Amino acid sequence: MEKFEILDELSIHGLKELMENDDKVFDIEILKDFIRTSGAYGFIYLLDNKPIGLAYACRLARPDGKIEMYLHSIDILPQYQNKGYGTRFLQNILNYANTKGFCNLFLCSSKSLHNACHVYEKLGGKRECEDEIIFDYPFYEDN
């Protein structure tokens, strides 16, 4: 049985495989801090009570008073990909954002992720531009 959940302190303990699959460090205390962060959202997709999908997003306030959701990452474990779980997971996230009053949900993706782009378009996502470049400015500690 499939289930969509909002990430909370009870559900974070089962995320090790998902986070490591997405090259993230699994640390309970960091996850607890994330959950407590205002404007941060975490979502889990479960199959028979096993987490198979993880997504996280943030709330963005616009100067016109509207609120958008930026979906930064959505991941399904490899063995569950191309079976419809990602589509249903994203649909649940879209439904959540809509019912919570967000005016829009947006995400960035690479054209090379053909299957992911297919899902985004299938669920009504529109490519805003074909020539977009994303600039990233990472800051690292000198350790």
Image (tube, grey):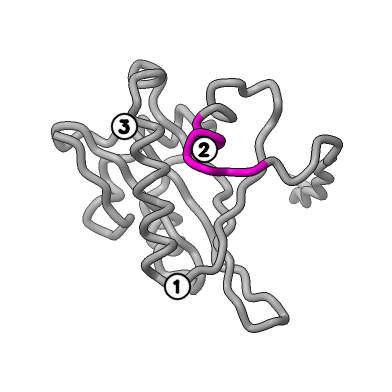
| Amino acid tagged 1 | Gly
**Could you tell whether 66 is left or right of 53 in the image?**
right
- Secondary structure beneath dot 3 equals strand
In this rendering, the label closer to the viewer, 2 or 1: 1
In this view, 41 is above or below 23: below
The residue indicated by pointer 3 is 52
In this rendering, the label closer to the viewer, 3 or 2: 3
Q: Residues within 10 Å of mark 3 (few under 14, many from 20)?
A: many
Is 52 in the magenta? no
| Amino acid tagged 2 | Lys
Closest to the observer, 13 or 41: 41
Looking at the rendering, which quadrant does residue 127 occupy? top right
Closest to the observer, 31 or 61: 61
The residue indicated by pointer 1 is 101
Could you say which disc has been placed on residue 24 in the image? 2
Q: CA distance from mark 1 to mark 3?
A: 27 Å
Rendered location of residue 89, percent (x, y): 36, 40
